[in-house]
Image (tube, rainbow, N blue to C red):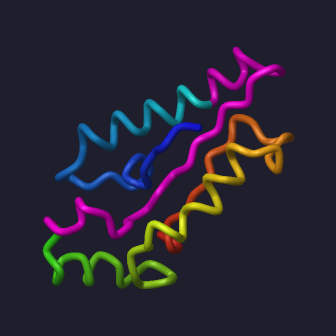
Amino acid sequence: MNISSTGSIRPRPAIVPYAAAKAGLNALTEGLAQALGPHVRVNTLMAGPFYTDAHQDWDPESLAEGLRPHALQRAGKASEITGAALFLISDASSYTSSATLRVDGGIP
């Protein structure tokens, strides 16, 4: 399981190098799934904004403004991505490969 970011599909000027790296990871997921299947499954968990140690550096007003168009209008808690990660690494996803699962609060 790879960890990507919604920045890879919605890049903002401030994160262009990061977004490009994550977009490359998305492509790598699909290529490796084809190269390593059927014995190895390769998937990506694409995270949106989550409250982590890094969020302490975010400007609260800018964050609130940026989250307004999201369906859930908030950042996620770490516990809200755990189920998706467990799905991708468990046998529950035994017929899932080359997938990118977005957990992002409904980014438009």
Q: Is residue 85 above or below residue 71?
A: above
Residue 77 magenta: no
Residue located at (38% from left, 67% from top): 50
In the depicted structure, whether residue 43 falls above or below residue 32: below
Q: Nearer the viewer, residue 82 or 29?
A: 82
Asked if residue 54 lies in the magenta stretch, the reply is yes
Residue 7 vs residue 58: left or right? right
Image coordinates for residue 3, horizontal then vertical, percent: 48, 43
- In the drawing, does residue 92 fall left or right of residue 27? right
Q: Specify whether 75 is left or right of 86.
A: left
Q: Quadrant of residue 34?
A: top right
Where does the image place residue 76, in percent across and percent down from the top left? Answer: 44, 73
> Residue 17 placed where, x, y %?
24, 37
Looking at the rendering, the stretch of residues picked out in magenta corresponds to 30-57
Label tally: 0
The quarter holding residue 51 reads: bottom left
Residue sitting at 40 percent across and 81 percent down? 74
| Residue at the (29%, 76%) spot, across then down | 66
Which quadrant is home to the N terminus?
top right
**Extreme residue in the top direction:** 35
Instruction: State the residue in front, 3 or 11.
Output: 3
Could you say where residue 38 lies in the image, as x and y percent from the top left?
83, 21
83 and 45: which is toward the camera: 83
Taking 84 as reference, is 60 above or below it? below
Residue 31 image-quadrant placement: top right
Q: Residue at x 39, y 55 (%)?
A: 10
